[in-house]
Image: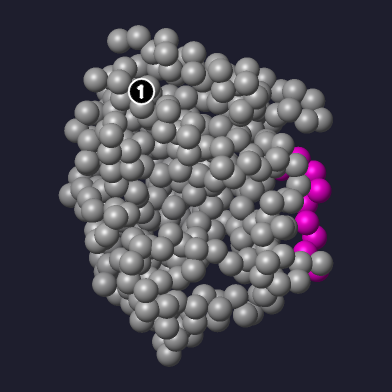
Amino acid sequence: MSFQQLDRYLTACITEKKIPGIVCWVGTSKKTLFFEARGFAQLIPGKVNINKNTIFDLASITKPLATALSIMFLYEKKQLRLNDRVRTFLPMSASCATGQKTIKQLLTHTAGLPAWFPLYLLPQQERLQYLASVASKNKGVLYSCLGYILLGMIVEKVTNLRLDRFCKEYIFRPLGLSNTMFGPIKKKNVAATEFGNKYEEQTAAQHGKTKAIKWRNYVLKGEVHDGNSFYGFNGVSGNAGLFSTARELAKLVRVYTAGGIVSKKTVKMMTRVQTNGKEKRGLGWIINPFPNFVSSRSFYHSGFTGTMCLVDPIKDSIVVFLTNAVHPVVRADLMPEVRQRLVEITAKTMA
């Protein structure tokens, strides 16, 4: 099995300056088949080479492998039920629209919450009230960072532990994952993301006054890129904030799919289609994201910073693809094509 085509493609992404740096891990539940690093962890103010142990901001991969996994861990411990309503855990939402929604609806992005809002523009005491009242009657899939922020709050309410502490105690440390954690990351070997928060600032300005925010004006490195996580929740929230390496993320996924964190029965529940309509969602995962290349049982998630994790249990394949695509500036339309091409090449190689 030769991965020369994949290697050439990754190298081209660097030489054509699409992406500063890449670490790609491809394997099965038992074997590593391809593991390479290309390019740079940082371009400004000076170039820093990337390596296989470079730590990346995983962005929204936080959702399935920290937040949803924590919720399902608590589900197995019978500390919550998927049909429990938000109001059970956040009493102030009892008379509000969001309070009527269930944990399952939050997990599957069917709670009708907006995709995004810069919560940090609101006074701290008003943020939860906003989340409590913002849900709509829409029953379809609407990808929502806000829903996962609520899930992170629910984990904290049930356990009396902040989300990062819970994940460390019950998921990451038992697996010996020393480079998988919420930030800030003090270690040097970390991939940089954006120079400042210009993209966030421009997007937030569409929702309110932003002058009071102390926007970051330096290269973001070891701090979560996501604005809600950083400005609103000190880097720890259910939508973003997790960092890891390709090696450790691959290990986490392997143990998870083997039933080593939650049971195999729960893994199957999380990774089967739970929604109606065109967009197929599991509990934390996107299901069958690349139907032309992988099986219908495959599950996947990506992150805004340029990250991706794909598992095909039928073909026994795992792809971990970590990049710093938002460094030094955000190009929001860059990664979909890159990810699809990567999946296409990998699937054909492993066929």
- Magenta-colored span: 212-221
Q: Main secondary structure of the magenta part?
A: loop
Q: Position of residue 275 (x, y in %)?
A: 26, 60
Question: Residue drawn 68% across and 63% down?
Answer: 204
The residue depicted at 77 percent of the width and 52 percent of the height is: 216
Q: As displayed, is residue 141 above or below residue 261? A: below
Image quadrant occupied by the C terminus: top left
Query: Of the residues shown, which amino acid type is indicated by label 1?
Result: Thr
- In terms of depth relative to the viewer, which is nearer, 17 or 65? 17
Q: Which residue sits at x=73%, y=28%?
A: 43
Q: How many marks?
A: 1
Residue where numbered disc 1 is placed: 346
Write the residue at 49% across / 13% down.
Answer: 8
Tell me residue 347's x, y (percent): 31, 25
Inspect the magenta stretch and tell me whether residue 215 lies in it: yes
Residue 95 screen position, x and y as percent? 43, 90
Is residue 155 shown to the viewer in this render?
Answer: no
